[in-house]
Amino acid sequence: MKRIEDQTYYELLEISPDATPKEIQQAYDRAKETFQLDSLAIYSLFPQEEVTKIQAAIEEAYRVLKDEELRRSYDQSCPHLFKHLSRAQQIHPPSEKLHEMKQGLSFTDISLEIKDIPYRGTSLKQLREQLGIDLKTIAAKTKINPRILESIENEELDRLPAPVYLKGFLKAYARVLNIDPQRLIEGYFQLFQERKKK
Amino acid sequence: MGGHSQRVIWTIGGGKGGSGKSFITTNIGVCLSKMGTRVILIDADLGGANLHTFLGILPPVPTLSDFIKKRVTQLHDLLIQTNIPNLKLLTGAQDLLNAADAKNVQKRKLLRSIKDLESDYILVDLGGGNALNVLDFFLMSDGGILVVTPEPTAIENTYRFLKSAFYRRLKQTVSSYSAKTLIDQTMDPKNEAGIQTPYDLFQEVKRINEEDGRRMMEEASKFHPNLILNQVRSKKDIEIGFSMRSACHQYFGIHLHYLGYIVFDQEVSNSIRKRKPLMVENDKSKAAQCLKEIAFRLAHSGSLDSFN
Ligand SMILES: Nc1ncnc2c1ncn2[C@@H]1O[C@H](COP(=O)(O)OP(=O)(O)OP(=O)(O)O)[C@@H](O)[C@H]1O
Ligand SMILES: [Mg+2]
């Protein structure tokens, strides 16, 4: 637990350090709404002076992060911010993140996409397992051969069907898990590029 | 928590009277039983046990108090089969929660007997109070669920419950007498130590007992209560759940898991008047759809490390 003063601007707005400007805006709007004096969600919880402090901190975070220039120098001033985006953790995202993603599962109209998980085969598998869904269920729902699903998850690129089909399969799989199909396709096809380079 | 990955006990409580705890307990139970899993509902509401009415059955004769008074030796014998396959009911748990002398050992023993029941899910309706026994049951279960409606009175009650549960749990974690005393003081808003927030408390405890301070922080990070927002009428209402999550994060440093929302729906009271669960009477209604989503999420929440 961190005091307001000790939180980074990203922590304050509950976003990741590589958040897009749009995400920053959304997070700010929500935080502002949450910590308004007459907000229901904080009713009876905080002492008033605490709310004023949080409001000021949120405004300051937004002022800096919305400005490209200011954000860059802020980021440079605290390099530890980006440590957690190291490669190892991208492959094994912290469980909290998956927790959130799971929560987004059927909040259809307000789903929370978590941006810093690379959309790959391994992360598909991880998410699926976290949700307690077995491959058979995915196969039944998507009408895709389980063996192909397995190859998708294990990133056995040489066993995968032609790109046009693969795209369709990824889209179907993404829909079952309620994650963004476009991002999955992009992420997955990036894999091909990376492997080629090697 | 150990190996019983199957038998999961959820407790539903915390909200203000009439927020929908019993309605939700019943219907999530029906939903899970329809998914083919075995479910036991336990009515532990101190004030007014009424799950049987939601299910359209008569108030059962043997109750949990018979078990406590040893007139019945097997908890199992107290279970009543409802009209719904896979769904059983146990009533009278209020007598236990009511018992002022219910010792921790006794509570744990009852909890163990409950955990030994043949079932996949056990849902306990705790009713609206925040008596110590209720808090303990909430804390000892695998997952505690708070039901709140988007009204200041309901939210105030929910936070009061959450604070009581949170501090009680912390108190059970620390070992030094001085830390325990500080926690007690914190619950009084005009305390002499000037402690206003959990953060102040952490700092103060850390100062007097480093080890207890560390334990408390660790315990807080493991405390993941769940939230259901009931009777929502707008998209803005739905957002309150996310806002409450942020507020709890800032205030307690805990993760409040937003399980979902249920819209306000006239069909709810129609079904209650007919004494049939909404999931049976009208499972296409809007509120029923919301309940299904929540039940699905409960069934797939593999991370039941929420408590312990
Ligand atoms: N989603 C909903 N839409 C419309 N009405 C609802 C909804 N949820 C609950 N209600 C109404 O609220 C009433 C109270 O619900 P319920 O008895 O489940 O509350 P409770 O939290 O168990 O109350 P208590 O604390 O007194 O036990 C119900 O009779 C029902 O008419
Ligand atoms: Mg009730």
Image (cartoon, rainbow, N blue to C red):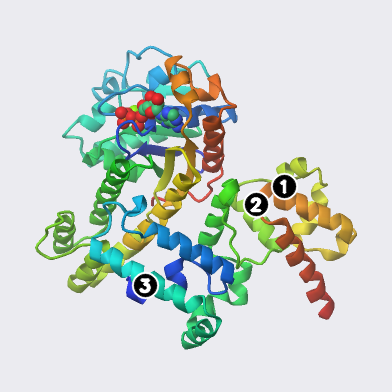
The residue under the point 42% across, 33% down is B123
Q: Secondary structure at mark 2?
A: helix
Q: Secondary structure at mark 1?
A: helix
Q: Percent position (x, y) of residue A1?
A: 35, 67
> In the image, is residue B63 above or below residue A89?
above
> In the image, is residue B88 above or below residue B204?
above
Q: Which residue is mark 1?
A: A135
On the question of residue B240 being in view, the answer is: yes
Mark 1 in CB contact with mark 2 (< 8 angstroms): yes
Q: Residue most toward the left?
A: B192
Q: Nearer the viewer, mark 2 or mark 3?
A: 3
Question: Could you tell me the amino acid type at mark 2?
Answer: Arg
The residue under the point 26% across, 28% down is B46
Q: Earlier in the sequence, mark 1 or mark 2?
A: 2
The residue under the point 47% across, 62% down is A29
On the question of residue B2 being in view, the answer is: no
Mark 2 chain: A
Which mark is on residue A57?
3
How far apart are the two marked residues, 2 and 3, measured between alpha carbons?
37 Å
Viewer-closest of A74 and A91: A74
Q: Percent position (x, y) of residue B155?
A: 32, 45
Residue A174 as seen in the image, left or right of residue B57: right
Q: Earlier in the sequence, mark 3 or mark 1?
A: 3
Q: Earlier in the sequence, mark 2 or mark 3?
A: 3
Residue B236 as seen in the image, left or right of residue A109: left
Question: Could you tell me the amino acid type at mark 3?
Answer: Ala
Viewer-closest of B215 and A114: A114
Q: Looking at the picture, do discs 2 and 3 lie on one chain?
A: yes
The residue under the point 79% across, 48% down is A146
Determine the image quadrant of residue B99: top left
How far apart are the two marked residues, 3 and 1, measured between alpha carbons?
45 Å
* Crowd tier of the residue under label 3, counting other residues whose Cα lies within 10 Å: few below 14, some 14–19, many 20 or above: some
